[in-house]
Amino acid sequence: GLDFGTANPFAFVLCAVDESNKLLVVDEAYGEGMLPREQAKRILECYRRFGIKNTQDVVVAADPAMFPPRDPSKRIGEYPIEAFWREGIRAIPAINNRIVGWTRLKELMHTDDLLVFKGRCSNLIRTIPLMIRDDKNPEDLDTSLEDHALDALRYAALVRTEASQAIIERVMPRFATITEQYLARQNQKTDTV
């Protein structure tokens, strides 16, 4: 998922779905003051770290504000998403229903179907505990907080495609083993308590 920003931070989370349908957050890119092309380059660095050579194997659910209006008569200039497309990033407009997205994330968190890899996702891990409910709408989060990485995750959580499964099956063959080892360690901890 990709949350766009230039003055505010942009956030990207690289996710995959394993064979048991868990959402795995394996990497992130995060920064502020970066132009769209620079952000796209940071995303491509995440891909390279995981050996993703064919960028079309990954579908990025991106902030809908980045896209041109559907009506061609309302389009002006270039839209941020076009820089990402030029770099080969396969981006689609994310579902931007905040309530549905937060509900999905809560479900994933409460059922242990969300795994975040600590070594690569420091901004997501840092900002999740900072989020609080909106006073006016308790089903939503307070948007005045640093919610960028969580917005990117919210976008990703609402997209489950064959392409995300392909990352595990074709591009990251060791990943399933790593996930199994992690889950086995978690089960051992639970069994000893």
Image (cartoon, rainbow, N blue to C red):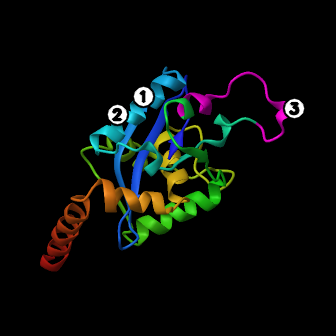
* Mark seen at residue 155: none
Q: Is residue 71 magenta?
A: yes
Residue drawn 64% across and 35% down?
66
Q: What residue does disc 3 label?
A: 73
Residue type at mark 1 is Lys
In the picture provided, is 26 more to the left or to the right than 68? left
Q: Position of residue 31 (x, y in %)?
A: 43, 28
Whether residue 139 is visible here, answered yes or no, is: no
Compared with 81, 57 (above or below) is below
Q: Secondary structure at mark 3?
A: helix
Q: Quadrant of residue 138?
A: bottom right
Which quadrant is home to the C terminus? bottom left
Q: Secondary structure at mark 1?
A: helix
Q: What residue does disc 1 label?
A: 41
Report the Cα–Cα distance between label 3 and label 1: 31 Å
Residue type at mark 2 is Glu
Q: What residue does disc 2 label?
A: 45
- Of pointers 2 and 3, the one earlier in the residue sequence: 2
Crowding around mark 1 (Cα neighbors within 10 Å: few <14, some 14 to 19, many 20+) is: some
Residue drawn 43% across and 58% down?
164
Crowding around mark 2 (Cα neighbors within 10 Å: few <14, some 14 to 19, many 20+) is: some
Do the CB atoms of the residues marked 2 and 1 lie less than 8 Å apart?
yes
- Residues 57 and 76: in front is 57
Range of magenta residues: 69-84
Q: Position of residue 39 (x, y in %)?
A: 47, 28
- Of pointers 3 and 1, the one earlier in the residue sequence: 1
